[in-house]
Amino acid sequence: MTQRPIELYVALLLCVGNACADAIPVADCEPGGRNVLAEIRSRGTLRVAHSNDYRPFTFRNADQSSTGIDADLARRLAADLHVSLGWVDTSWSTLTADLQANRFDIAMSGVSITSERSRAGCFTATYFTTGKTALTRCALKRTFDTLAEIDEPEVTVIVNRGGTNERFVREHLHNARIVVHEDNRTIFGALASGEGDVMITDAVEARLEAQANPALCVSQPPVLFETVEKAYLIPKDPVWRDWLDRWLAKLQRSGDIEAITRRYLDAPQPTRAAPNG
């Protein structure tokens, strides 16, 4: 069995009840008539899709450049392929459609493995594991450590559109008030200002946002409601998938993935004041 990559954070997390389900089965990477490696080398550019809104994977620096674990690994991948790097902006609502429209060669943005995405394309080996947890407003002076505590009519859950957070909320919450926020870059400020009481998101993101904003809190250690595996989403091409799996395995053996991951998980987070309101 292939050794799982670094899980700096997951070892500290708790699952409640039977909510942490087995990993979502990934469909076989059936050939799709593509030779992505040949296309990349002929083009001279690696097209990398990213949402640029998800710390610590891809997000914007103060100068608006892309940074994060996957941004660094994307630059490394382009260099190892001896081609230039071309960023392709995507969103969680349009990621699968962008893949089917052949807009990118690989999505590197903290993409979670889902059945829908695996039917549309192929996933590489998992390189990071986290899970869904509750991020709350500290002013509530309470944590939400079970879905039953969240799924109450007086609780407002804020969620970003189109990704696995919204899927999870729609599947598991039926009584709470759900508010959809369109921009993942501003959703944490909206939560802090009182537009919601809770946001269910990946624990790694919840931890970083709570560190950055004193108005936001997460249980320590966070309680996982569902395990989430991160991998790279690519077109249906098993040759390209196998090449990437070997590339990832090499970076794991060298310690490079661990070093890059620690750079973003261990770095001090900027403190952002909570918005007024």
Image: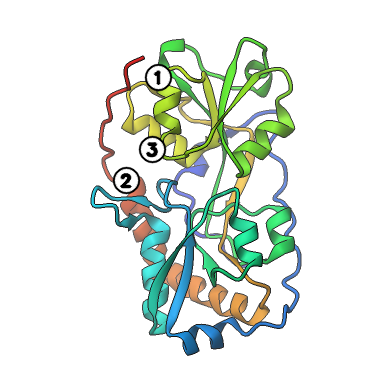
Residue hosting label 3: 208
Q: Is residue 75 left or right of residue 155?
A: left
Say above or below: 151 vs 209. Answer: above
| Front-most of residues 134 and 120 | 120
**Percent coordinates x, y for residue 160 in the rendering:** 55, 36
Q: Rate crowding at label 1 as few (under 14), some (14 to 19) or many (20 or more) other CA atoms within 10 Å.
A: some
Which amino acid lies under the numbered mark 1 shown in the image of this protein? Answer: Ser
* Distance between mark 3 and mark 2 Cα atoms: 10 Å
Residue in the image at 32% along x and 33% along y: 212
Earlier in the chain: of badge 1 and badge 3, it is 1
**Please, what secondary structure does the residue beneath circle 2 have?**
loop
State whether residue 261 is above or below residue 242: above
Q: Nearer the viewer, mark 3 or mark 2?
A: 3
Residue contact between numbered discs 1 and 3, judged by CB atoms under 8 Å = no
- In what element is the residue under mark 1? loop
Q: Say which residue appears at 72% left-offset and 29% top-offset.
A: 172
The kind of residue on which mark 3 rests is Leu
Residue located beneath label 2 in the image: 266
Instruction: Tell me the kind of residue under disc 2.
Output: Asp
- Front position among marks 1 and 3: 1
Q: Residue at x 47, y 56 (%)?
A: 6
Which residue is the site of mark 1? 193
State the CA–CA distance, disc 1 to disc 3. 18 Å
Image quarter hosting the N terminus: bottom right
Whether residue 199 can be seen here: yes
| Residue 232 picture quarter | bottom right
Q: Tell me which residue sits at (36%, 14%) in the image.
A: 277
